[in-house]
Amino acid sequence: MGKYLLKLPKMGESVAEATLTAWLKDVGDSISIDESIVEVATDKVDSDIPSEVEGVLIEKRFEVNQIAQVGDVIGVIEVAGETEVIEEEEVIESNVSKPEVQEITADVDPVEIIEADISNAQTIINTPIISVSDTSRFYSPLVKNIAKEEGISIDELEQVPGTGDKGRVTKKDILAYIEGRANSGSEIKYIPTQPISQIHSEEPPSIPSGQDQIIQMTRMGKMISDHMVNSRKTSAHVQSFFEVDVTDLWDWRERVKGKFQAREQEKLTFTPIFIAAVVKALKEFPLLNSSVSGDNIIQKKNINIGMATALSDGNLIVPVIKNTDHLNLVGLARAVNDLSVRARDNKLSPDEVQDGTYTVTNVGNFGSITGIPIINQPQVGILAIGVIRKMPAVIETPKGDFIGIRRKMMLCHSYDHRIINGAMGGQFVKAVGDALEHWDTSIDF
């Protein structure tokens, strides 16, 4: 008999982890090829992981609500015949190198740590950190690594209660111990390399009164929060605004939308029209269709537009229309309508929320005049479209200027100032506005 290691697959660009939401099979259950074993959720979409082999599930390495990194072994399937399997120690080593451990290390420290050095901490605190190998008690390589990173001495580690086989200390045990130590204000093992005056400790938690309501953030809400905060830390956000007169466009849509729906069996909303204008501008300014990787700029060949979609529970998802530059207005309308409906019904596949190269968010749907959006990493630009309003405006004619009622809206373009300067950022949003103001109103259906 052989063993097949079920790993968390790559779930899309910029997705490094997923939360296990439900095991569909129990240990001992038979599994067929392509049969779903476990359901997972990322900050983009919920999905399930099928089996590539036929066999019996013999081990679960992650529990429900635990977070796994891409490439982590989440289960083991016993199969008939000889199947190549990674050695146990190899699996543990790969887990040790995952960023999860580093993130937990930072989270449990009582102060914000920019850089930490075990040897510096040992010198300053003058507390010898003894190798965890100097003991008869067994510790896995993962537990040893965490202990080393946290500066836990052998004497301290010996006091950690273990819930594993024969009292072994598991990863969960040592992380729980570290968290408890941090909460109790125990000795700080890490010494920040920056001056104390520059250290900003976390704000003390707000203590609710008896009448306050405590609302637990949803899993998706937490992921969106992390994604937005990380975007602010990653990109140098800057904005350009542009006011657009869409009176002619409004009148054209009112005239053709009935015939469009009768012929194509699709509603003609403003969203596909806005996306068409964005695509036209991206062709003129292709650097906006890029991402940044270190010191390199990756200019994308395909134009894949993400459209931010609000869900009924208050969360947000961004389905992606692939190769939008190859679609006409009819194709865009069908894609927008289809993805919007399935997004709200939680029926999107992982492929439909990844590989976006530029994002559009229509804040005008909720009556907002404008909004300042946060860049959807790893992209370098996002456009917020405000509500269309009737406004008094100066109208220039060969016979002079006069005041008239026009339909106008605001565009706000947020872009990454690391590679997009103000001139290009402003020219891009103006190009979008010009495309809308000079829309071909001779098109009929």
Image (cartoon, rainbow, N blue to C red):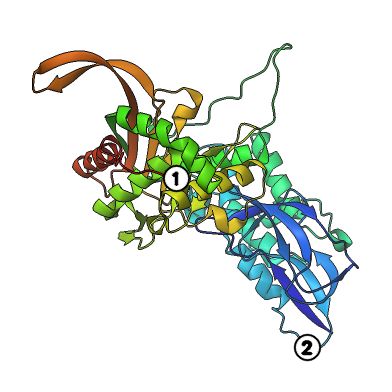
Q: Which kind of residue does numbered mark 1 sit on?
A: Asn
Residue that carries the numbered disc 1 in the rendered image: 376
Question: Dot 2 surroundings within 10 Å: few (below 14), some, or many (20 or more)?
Answer: few
86, above or below 317, in the image: below
* CB contact under 8 Å: marks 2 and 1: no
Q: Which residue is drawn at 69% across and 30% down?
A: 216
| Residue 104, image x, y percentages | 60, 49
Quadrant occupied by the C terminus:
top left
- In the rendered image of this protein, does residue 320 appear above or below residue 436? below
* Direction right: furthest residue: 28
Q: x, y percentage for residue 299? A: 32, 60
Asked whether, in this view, residue 97 is left or right of residue 52, the answer is left
Q: Name the residue under label 2.
A: 82
Q: Which amino acid does label 2 sit on?
A: Glu
Q: Nearer the viewer, mark 2 or mark 1?
A: 1
Name the side, left or right, on which 57 lies relative to 73. right
